[in-house]
Image (spheres, coloured by chain):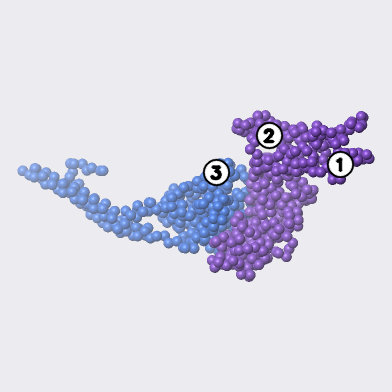
Amino acid sequence: MKATLASMFTASGLAAAALLLGADRIAPSMHHWQEAPLAGCRDCHDETGRPPTNVHQPVAFAHDSAAPPATSVRDGVPDVVVIAQLAEHYSPVMFDHRIHADMSQLSGGCTNCHHNSVAGAQVAACRECHSPLRDGGTLTQPSLKGAYHRQCLGCHRDWSHENGCGYCHREQSPRTDVAHVIDPSDIIMTPHPRVQPSGSYIYQTNSPSGSLVSFSHDGHAQAYGLKCVDCHQGGSCSGCHDGSAPVRHAAGGMPSCQACHATNNCNFCHADHARPAFEHSASTGWSLEPQHARVACVSCHGRVEAFLTPSTSCRACHGDLSPANFDHRITGVPLLGSHALLECSRCHTGSRADSPATCNGCHADKHYPQNAPGAR
Amino acid sequence: MFAFPANIPSRSAREALSRRDFVKISGVCAAGLATAGAARASEKRALDPDRRGVLVDLTVCVGCRRCEWACNNANDLPNGDLSDCDDQSIFKSRRRPTSVHLTVVNRMAGSDGSKPIFVKTQCMHCEHPACVSACLVGAMRKTADGPVIYDASRCIGCRYCMVACPYQFAAYEYENALTPQVKKCQLCQSRTSRGELPACVAMCPVEALTYGRRDELLKLAHERIDCNPDRYVNHVYGEHEGGGTSWLYLADRPFTELGFPALGPDSPAELTETIQHGIFKGFAAPVMLFGLLGAIGKLSHASTAHTHAEHTEKVTP
């Protein structure tokens, strides 16, 4: 779509007229409406008929329906964008799109910059709405120059405190050599300098149930396999970078513990002493090695909001463990030879189903391997 | 009050008569002048409905100070290199416009530790300017299309305008011993008359400044507030302050935190003009004043004549 300013405003005027007339759909001459697979006028325009704004953006429309939509931040987005629409006035800017796209996952995604666009739709170029001329016939929108500067300086002045021309306007940007990433779904592997999650935090509180709350950042980030964006959402660059200190590990927009651990048991978090980081074997007496370590916590404990203590019965999870249904090799102990013919109870003699198998019932010189499933 | 010596009554009476004649003549002259003056002042200053102004969106300003550079450049004031604007240390102290910096940007820290905000200041170009009201010689003039213009050729250097300004944004060339002028933003009238934007507005890289018709800017400002209620406080500074100003401001926090004076909806000139014009309305004050003086004079004359007669009787043999 070539949404010129004139057509946008004509469209908004007609949209207002359509609203007044109670029309449900705008006449098909509206470019943006023709290509938007959406419902009524008020999806975009409020009762005043004003066009959607940067913040008030109730809906977005596909500006170019012929182009393949980008389905993720990785898919079909450029690494580097050369901003040279106003090259006769200003030296081109090499904009490192990749790192901005990656980091935007922490604070709202693509729409931070590509307002009036939604995931799944081809985003519109800035110049489709923002006129290169300052006086583009409207006071309501910044020109292309103003729009670019707002997008860049609006964030950069907050945390790098850079607002000089030379910060962007130079012949070559040293940051345009963007390394490709390994894990596309998390920022840890992005060109952003690798984030080193710190170990543990001990929070002092006023709670009568225990003044100390121990939080293992390592545990959440590594042992539990959480991604940064699982917790760090809705923040901003300056939430971590305040300019004077390079990195401040107190990003805004953090959910509280109760967002995940919705328990009424105060002692779940609060204690009178600092707790060591959670380690499954030491803390519960149940080793996860080797196979259960690969299983997500919620597979056994139900909702992460309130961990359930699962049954220690193998059959509670594994159901019928008859040799026909259970591949014993996943335990690390393949049943070879005559072992395949034995009843389970010949080796698993304990009263609990998770009791380790005993070998010395038959083999006086054999012991069950260490790190096999089950409680010790 | 001056009291005549009692031993020369006849001379005093003769002088009082002649003085009364003088006062009569000068009273008639003063009445004529005052009536003419009151008539001029009571004319409501007619403002063009499409008069211009500038809307400053402080939530957009990044504090780059390019407006300061552009202003000095356009007004032939001493100016450094453009990159000098990058010096952030200048924000350590709060500045006011001076004779060589007609506009300055200050960084204002939030009272609750919120992030700093940058505030551009310059002459606000009031709708009913106190400086124009205070000026004895008409060197300050509110033009119908918005700007308040200073005419150095009329100025006598009394600096009443600077005292009258509620924003204290007018500056004086104290460093110029021979031909000092009052210096203030003229809203780039030379540029706007050519169809160009004011220098600061044209320079602003983020377009935090919008130049246009004042009524359209007000509409735009309220639209922005309506559409982004979380971004702005519901207040357009300059819409009503001091009777309204040509420069309008939007911000994300109360304006009193940003150094803007809390002014009522009336122009500071309104009170003084009302009193002065009211006093002289219908020639009332001169009539009352000179009527009172006349009555005092008449009583005094009668008393003096009586005393003189008694004295004359006493000395008659």
In this figure, which residue is indicated by the disc labeled 1?
A: A328
Residue nearest the observer in this picture, B314 or B181: B181
Q: Colour of chain B?
A: blue
Locate residue B233 relative to residue B270 in the image: left or right. right
Image marks 2 and 1: residues in contact by CB distance under 8 Å? no
Disc 3 residue crowd, few under 14, some 14–19, many 20+, Cα 10 Å: few
Disc 2 residue crowd, few under 14, some 14–19, many 20+, Cα 10 Å: many
Q: Residue at x 65, y 39 (%)?
A: A263
Q: CA distance from mark 2 to mark 1?
A: 39 Å
Q: Colour of chain A?
A: purple
Locate residue B230 relative to residue A320 in the image: left or right. left
Residue B12 x, y percent position in the rendering: 20, 46
* Residue type at numbered disc 2: Ser
* Residue type at numbered disc 1: His
The answer to whether marks 2 and 3 sit on the same chain is no
Question: Residue A138 appears in which quarter of the rendering?
Answer: bottom right
Residue nearest the observer in this picture, B170 or B301: B170
Q: Look at the image and tell me whether residue B104 can be seen.
A: no
Tell me, for residue B94, which label it has, or none: 3
Task: Name, please, the residue furthest toward the left.
Answer: B317
Tell me, for residue A214, which label it has, or none: 2
Residue nearest the observer in this picture, A230 or A368: A368
Residue nearest the observer in this picture, A290 or B96: A290
Q: Describe the element under mark 3 as helix, strand or loop.
A: loop
Q: Nearest to the eye among marks 3 and 1: give it.
A: 1
Residue B280 x, y percent position in the rendering: 32, 55
Residue B40 x, y percent position in the rendering: 37, 60
* Residue type at numbered disc 3: Arg
